[in-house]
Image (tube, rainbow, N blue to C red):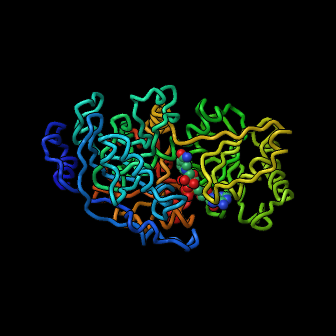
Amino acid sequence: MQAYLDAIQGGASGADIAAIPVPESYRAATVHKDEAGMFEGVDSSDKDPRKSIHVEEVATPELAPDEVYVALMASSINFNTVWTSIFEPVSTFGFLSRLGKESEYGARHDLPYHVMGSDGSGVVVKVGAAVRSWKPGDRVVIHCNSVDDQDPSAHDDSMLATNQRIWGFETNFGGLADLSIVKANQLMPKPAHLTWEEAAVNALCNSTSYRMLVSRNGADMKQGDVVLIWGATGGIGGYAVQYVLNGGGIPVGVVSSPERAQLLRDMGCEAVIDRAANGYRFWSDEHTQDESEWRRFGKDIRGLVGTDPDIVFEHPGRSTMGASVFVAKRGGLVMTCAATSGYMIEYDNRHLWMKLKTIKASHFANYREASEANKLIAQGRIQPLLSETRPLDEVGEAALSVHKNQSEGKIGVLCLAPQAGQGIDDAELREKVGEDKITLYQRHAAGGGS
Ligand code: NAP
């Protein structure tokens, strides 16, 4: 892999990069199938990714005709890194074994280890025989929607494809590694004004929030819409805030500390709720929700923006869904894509049907949506949410931090890139967009505030 790094840093041509032999093995963050039971009986919040994640050499898989090898300069931690590493709600080895039965190339994925990671930035080093739009030397970011486009169900909206999978979660050979294989239709141009790690953190969360709010497949938000955003300085929430502001909507951001409340204000979100300071107890015990607490929350939202939310950007799941359904306005929409705090959801259906509300589901993004979301990053209209950067050896620590809700935005991971700050190809655009905007989350994490 050193030869690739030297070539990339030395500005080698695509032909020179293509001439470097693909190494037989590479460094990767993995979990092991024979350790999938290691947390049995342990409370979810006590499951420690540092115990299950290994950083080790793995064999390089062969390339399918519609795939490329990417030398990864950087990657990022996603919440699915946490799910994979604590084997919840299920072990990801079940996904790999099903994929293994699907085809000859699918069989490569069914291994006793899982290379995880669903984001990446880097350089294409070799392309399969059927790849037309990309070539060695291209600087790219990778989105995680892996679909077989020869299946008719993959057309119209590839998120509805029967064989749709999330790369590095439901497939092997993910992005927390020095090398990966991905389908050519997962590639997008790297935003030229960003460093490798700033470029690497966006695709999964940014595309998810784009589909949820902007796309016709999601909320199709319009100017003036009030959007309640849970976890508004988190991975998907931080992009959601930017989409609402860009689209002329009115975000109401919910966070759990004064520091996060300040970060939200620095992003331009004026209506901020600190859920910890307000002490909402939507659940009075494990089995019972308290409507008076939903009502208090709704009153606080009205107090800030004068009306109920047109759209609720929902992902915490069990702990908040009852409140989300309650506070959405008459005819309003609850857009959900996750259930961090529990997936067996409870809400009062009377508030849904009597007020003609809708719950709509979303999951990642199709290629078009991911590409449009990436364009906005590349134009400097949506900012990366990188708050800190860790070496690949510290993926376990980084995943623990996300699991414990201790970090804001996104944690970047350096793969081949020897240090942070490299990979900027368009300094002029960077200056035009503004260092202050691009690095807002990094400065906050460093205690620098606005
Ligand atoms: P994240 O960076 O950890 O942010 C989540 C935020 O949610 C936190 O910052 C926290 O904010 C808030 N939160 C956590 N637990 C909460 C609770 N019990 N009640 C209210 N707020 C809570 O994670 P993320 O990357 O944004 O992902 C969020 C969820 O979406 C995860 O479950 C992830 O797996 C899922 N996801 C799904 C897709 C998809 O395509 N379906 C894509 C991306 C992510 P405060 O503590 O500040 O309020």
x, y percent for residue 416? 27, 55
Query: Height in image: 298 above or below 220?
Result: below
Name the quarter showing ligand 1. Answer: bottom right
Instruction: Indicate whether 210 appears above or below 322.
Output: above
Identity of the residue furthest to the front in this view: 101
**Residue lying at 64% horizontally and 60% vertically, measured from the top left:** 341
Question: Is residue 46 rendered to the left or right of residue 194?
Answer: right
Horizontal and vertical percent position of residue 137: 23, 39
Q: Position of residue 295 (x, y in %)?
A: 85, 54
Q: How many marks?
A: 0
The x and y percentages for residue 423 are 31, 48
Q: Residue at x 38, y 58 (%)?
A: 413
Task: Give the quadrant of the C terminus.
Answer: bottom right
Classify residue 101 as left or right of residue 41. Answer: left
Q: Choose top left, top right, bottom left or bottom right for residue 123.
A: top left
Front position in the image: 109 or 180: 109
Can residue 316 be spotted in the picture? Answer: yes
In front: 353, or 450? 353
In what quadrant of the picture does the N terminus appear? bottom left
93 sits to left or right of 416: right
Is there any visible trace of residue 198 in the rendered image?
A: no
Picture residue at 76% right of the left edge, 42% below the top = 309
* 423 or 24: nearer the viewer: 24
Q: Going 60% across and 46% down the picture, which residue do you hit? A: 337
